[in-house]
Image (cartoon, helix red, strand yellow):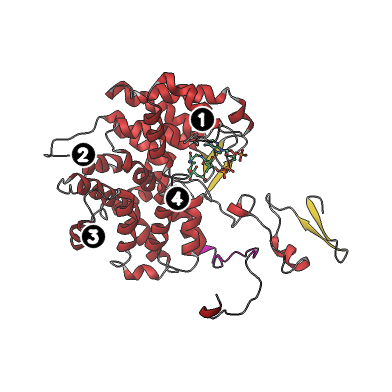
Amino acid sequence: MEESVTLTDNRTGRSIEIPIVGGGVDAGAWRKLLGGIWFNDPGMATTAVTSSAVAEIDGEAGILRYRGYPIEQLAERSTFPEVAYLLVYGELPTGAQLDEWTFEITRHTFIHENFRKRIYDAFHYDAHPMGLLVSGVAGLSTFYPEAKDIFDPDNRRAQIVRLIAKMPTLAAAAYRFSRGLPFQFPENADDYPTRFLKMMFDVGGDYEPDPPLVQAMRVLFILHADHGQNCSTTATRVVGSSHADPYTAIAAGCAALYGPLHGGANEAVIDMLTQIGSYDEVDGFIAEVKAGKHRLMGFGHRVYKNYDPRAMIIKAAAHDVFKVIGKNPLLDIALKLEEVALADDYFVSRRLYPNVDFYSGLIYQALGFPTNMFTVLFAIGRTPGWLAHWNEMVEQKSRIYRPRQIYTGAPKRDYVPMKDR
Ligand code: SDX
């Protein structure tokens, strides 16, 4: 075999040759030779849990492609519904396919009135919108019990359409609830980003978002749409692998995204920039990061060991937005942080570069979103990606995720009666 590795068990002298296929080696061959010996791989940093055709990421080259199409071209020329179709079905839609897809999504944006009026009312007014979203998505599963029939492709499409259509409605409802504003119903005549912005910010029926702001929302949704086996997509696949319905699987994805090391980073970046407070405090903050007192939020990535291509596109989009609504004062601090970090060996040696979350929050804030809505925006964008992976996993007839462990606990011991403790 040309491309292969040889594995030898030095306890027995037995060896096997394992072919390197598609950048991976088959762990099954390992099991044949070394039964009961497991890869110890915390965080699955070197483990491919599945094969997937949805997104290709080259961390060294800073490349991201959705079904082979470069993210730069999609961000410039596509629409979010079109990218959602591409991710789920693997090909760019024809005109007729896109019209049908857009028609279906447009007509599934409503959520049941019982649900809208009661589920959010159960929360405190200042509940974090991600808490509402995770609960809302999970609750949706109770309105569509037929979604459990995951092996019917038509049924899968119906739920996929519903989730892509309803995420903005759930998101906007969570925001309006937190502001004590009446719910704004979705308008069928609007495109996806415009409809969402109106549900968020229209008060009185005369709100029309500026076209550059709609364009920024379009680009941000597209850039967040998928990213391979990231933490939240893996959570979606893990829950989906037990054959739970897609609403429950996507709720798991939302829950994983909430964490500040993942989708919560965009909110954490703004908090960090606000904490730094001024351009002159940047050097001092960087020194504290290097001393281990803080993480530089919005920097670093498990896969990108070069610039995250999405960060470059978002940085350019930020300037377009600021031309319309004025520069976000935190931008200068962010630009200085980037300049200082990229010239400092602490970050360069650890290959820490700005990721998708470093600049996105500056745009969201300039568009008028409160920081606690930022991860919700990430979830809206990521929903087609989560669904594409869930759909792929069902079609692959994936086995249930059940990893092993290295046990480090106490050896066998007998129960001790209370009097002897
Ligand atoms: C997203 O996976 C995806 O694809 C995610 C995502 C997607 O689209 O789904 O791209 C979206 O989640 C982007 C990442 C957003 N998170 C942040 O910006 C939070 C800050 N970044 C980090 O916490 C960190 O970089 C991670 C979580 C992104 C990656 O963590 P890893 O791969 O586990 O890296 P690590 O924690 O092992 O760090 C390696 C070294 C460590 O130093 P040493 O122990 O070797 O001395 O780099 C240091 C870390 O301390 N380090 C940082 C740092 N990130 C890593 N030091 C300072 N600031 C940072 N941001």
At label 1, which amino acid type do we have? Glu
Q: Are marks 3 and 1 in contact (CB under 8 Å)?
A: no
Task: Give the residue pinned by disc 2.
Answer: 201
Task: Give the residue pinned by disc 3.
Answer: 119
At label 2, which amino acid type do we have? Phe
Residue 26 on image: x %, y %: 70, 59
Q: Secondary structure at mark 2?
A: helix
Task: Give the residue pinned by disc 1.
Answer: 288
Q: Quadrant of residue 275?
A: top left
Task: Give the residue pinned by disc 4.
Answer: 385
Quarter of the render that holds ligand 1 = top right
Task: Give the magenta range.
Answer: 395-408
**In this rendering, the label closer to the viewer, 4 or 3:** 3
Badge 3 crowding class, 10 Å Cα cut-off, few under 14, some 14 to 19, many 20 or more, is some
At label 4, which amino acid type do we have? Gly
Residue 250 on image: x %, y %: 40, 57
Q: Residue furthest front?
A: 419
- Earlier in the chain: of badge 3 and badge 2, it is 3
